[in-house]
Image (cartoon, grey):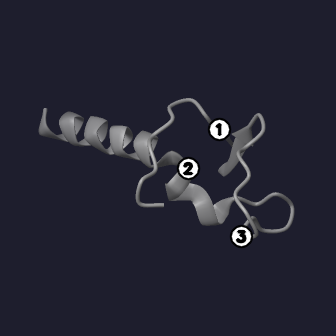
Amino acid sequence: MANATLQPGAVGAHCDRGILILDGTPPALGSYVLPGNNYHVYDYALFWGSIRRDAERRLAAWHR
């Protein structure tokens, strides 16, 4: 969606043995959710703000 806005904290997540687990109830995302509530298709769409912050943090550490 071209006019979407970032909604911090709308979807939480944590890793469990290398698998990303969504916390709480994710928003309705349509028919692309895979069987077993697999949201892999939405990895970047749901967490791009967090991914960007992590990349900026890692780059700053590398520059130091």
Q: Measured from the top left, where is residue 18 in percent x and y?
A: 65, 50
Res. 64 mark: none
Farthest residue in the front direction? 3
Q: Residue at x 44, y 49 (%)?
A: 48
How many residues crowd around disc 3 within 10 Å: few (fewer than 14), some, or many (20 or more)?
Answer: few
Q: For the residue labelled by badge 2, is the local secondary structure a helix, a strand or a loop?
A: helix
Instruction: Give above or below for 64 relative to 44.
Output: above
Instruction: Give above or below for 49 relative to 10.
Output: below
Report which quarter residue 9 is drawn in: top right
Amino acid found under the numbered disc labelled 1: Ala
* Label total for image: 3
Report which quarter residue 13 is drawn in: top right
Q: Measured from the top left, where is residue 19 in percent x and y?
A: 69, 51
Mark yes or no: residue 57 visible.
yes
Circles 1, 2 touching at the beta carbon (< 8 Å): yes
Cα gap from disc 1 to disc 2, whole angstroms:
10 Å
Q: Which residue is mark 1?
A: 13
Q: Measured from the top left, where is residue 17 in percent x and y?
A: 71, 46
Which numbered disc, 1 or 3, marks the residue closer to the eye?
3
Q: Residue at x 78, y 39 (%)?
A: 25
Q: Which residue is mark 3?
A: 32
Along the polypeptide, which appears first: circle 1 or circle 2?
Answer: 1
How many residues crowd around disc 1 within 10 Å: few (fewer than 14), some, or many (20 or more)?
Answer: few
Amino acid found under the numbered disc labelled 2: Leu
Q: Measured from the top left, where is residue 57 in percent x and y?
A: 29, 35
Q: Residue at x 57, y 57 (%)?
A: 43
